[in-house]
């Protein structure tokens, strides 16, 4: 992928590789391509703003399945990378693009929706890999929203979301009560937010969770 991006005419390609065993081979294949810079680093611990600087970047990556979600969310939260096109395990990719009312919908879906529009680009079957993995993959594209997300206390927002999905089969009223509110206070909060207290967390869109945070007592 690094070679293909460089040969396609990219002004600069930053290849981030954590596996020290692969670094010599990567250095060899990109030799003679001055546009390529290889960074030996763990992408889950990078300061993205310091690493990328002020420029605009596009992310094209085949992400490790166990840390793919974390890297995508870090990129969305910390940088102006746009778009983000990544290959992930199918289950992980489906969670990132899922909408309300689907089994895959959850906290990761909402964090992605806060800053981007996400879609599945294509399936990638196991047989195209060697050695063949036991799971399928998907390519996902995330395009950052042209406007900033609605103003909200994000720490409070993700606290509410995480609490709600900790028991996703319970009602949203139960989730608000677990935040420390009594039955009448929980119902009042949801009334101010315009949210049906009897719906389940996976039925609510991002705007509903933002409204709940806005309705919480100061």
Image (tube, rainbow, N blue to C red):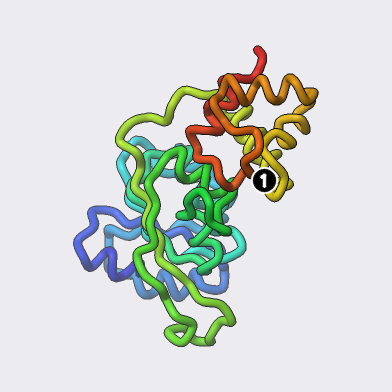
From this viewpoint, which residue is outermost toward the left? 9
Q: Nearer the viewer, residue 93 or 4?
A: 93
Q: Residue tagged by mark 1? A: 165
Vertical arrangement, residue 47 with respect to residue 25, above or below: above
The reply, left or right, for residue 102 in relation to residue 159 is left
Q: Nearer the viewer, residue 148 or 162?
A: 162
From this viewpoint, which residue is outermost toward the top? 218
Q: Is residue 43 visible?
A: no
Residue 132, image x, y percentages? 53, 86
SS category of the residue bearing label 1: helix
Residue 186 quadrant: top right
Q: Residue at x 33, y 50 (%)?
A: 83
Q: Nearer the viewer, residue 53 or 209?
A: 209
Residue 178 quadrant: top right
Q: Residue at x 39, y 74 (%)?
A: 28
| Quarter containing the N terminus | bottom left
Residue 85, image x, y percentages? 37, 58
**Mark 1, residues whose alpha carbon is within 10 Å: few (<14), some, or many (≥20)?**
some
């Amino acid at each position: 992928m690094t070679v293909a991006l460089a040969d396609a005419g990219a002004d600069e390609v930053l290849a981030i590789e954590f596996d020290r065993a692969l670094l010599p081979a990567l250095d060899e294949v990109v030799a003679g391509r001055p546009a390529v810079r290889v960074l030996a680093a763990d992408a889950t611990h990078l300061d993205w703003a310091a690493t990328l600087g002020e420029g605009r970047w596009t992310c094209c990556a085949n992400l490790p399945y166990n840390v793919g979600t974390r890297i995508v969310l870090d990129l969305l939260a910390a940088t102006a990378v746009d778009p983000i096109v990544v290959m992930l395990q199918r289950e992980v990719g489906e969670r990132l693009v899922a909408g309300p009312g689907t089994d895959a919908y959850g906290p990761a879906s909402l964090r992605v929706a806060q800053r981007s529009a996400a879609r599945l680009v294509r399936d990638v079957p196991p047989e195209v890999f060697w050695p063949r993995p036991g799971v399928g993959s998907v390519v996902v594209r995330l395009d950052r929203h042209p406007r900033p997300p609605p103003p909200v206390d994000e720490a409070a927002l993700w606290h509410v979301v995480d609490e709600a999905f900790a028991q996703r089969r319970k009602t949203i009223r139960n989730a608000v009560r677990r935040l420390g509110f009594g039955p009448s206070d929980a119902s009042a909060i949801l009334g101010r937010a315009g949210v049906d207290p009897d719906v389940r967390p996976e039925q609510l869109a991002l705007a509903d969770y933002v409204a709940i945070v806005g309705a919480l007592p100061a």
